[in-house]
Amino acid sequence: MELYIDDNQSKVNIGEDIEKELFRVVKKVLEIENIAKEYEISISFVDNETIKKLNRDYRGVDMDTDVLSFPLEDNIDVGGPTLLGDIIISLEKALEQSKDFGHTLEREIAYLTVHSMLHLLGYDHMEEEEKFIMRSKEKEIMKQLGIFKKEKEES
């Protein structure tokens, strides 16, 4: 698996270990989905303004969002790993949500990455049945990663 991470924003600082954690998250999603094929995935961090523009241009929704997934419809063979798609995460929105939910930014980024990886693999949540399946998979993956909704407070 090849993972490319690009930080295209300057409003939210992320820790140095984020690349290792994202690699672990993406690898776990592929493992749980029983995917042995080698894939190439890119994750870009942007600000709210950029993700709002992308959301408007590609989905027709003129508002910011936390994450966008761009699966490649055609698996392009370039002689190496298959290009799976792109994940775009607004770090501003992720930080805001992490504070609202009472957990760390790193946990929020991990969850958004799991969510987007499932979209890249063809899952959706537009219909109730699809939503149930996707949410169940998200919970299982986060559990196997050992990442839970609220981190335990130190004693």
Image (cartoon, rainbow, N blue to C red):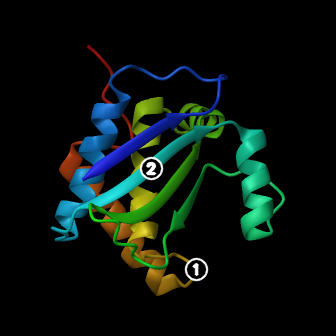
Image coordinates of residue 82 in percent, x first then y, are 32, 66
Image coordinates of residue 144 in percent, x first then y, are 19, 52
Residue bearing mark 1: 126
Please report contact status of discs 1 and 2: CB closer than 8 Å, yes or no.
no
Q: Name the residue at 61% across, 33% down.
A: 8
Q: Is residue 2 visible?
A: yes
| Picture quadrant of residue 79 | bottom left
Q: Secondary structure at mark 2?
A: strand
Q: Is residue 64 visible?
A: no
Which sits earlier in the primary sequence, circle 1 or circle 2? 2
Q: Secondary structure at mark 1?
A: loop
Image coordinates of residue 52 in percent, x first then y, are 77, 50
As drawn, the residue found furthest toward the right would be: 62
Image coordinates of residue 24 in percent, x first then y, are 24, 43
Q: Name the residue at 39% across, 64% down.
A: 83
Q: Amino acid at mark 1?
A: Met
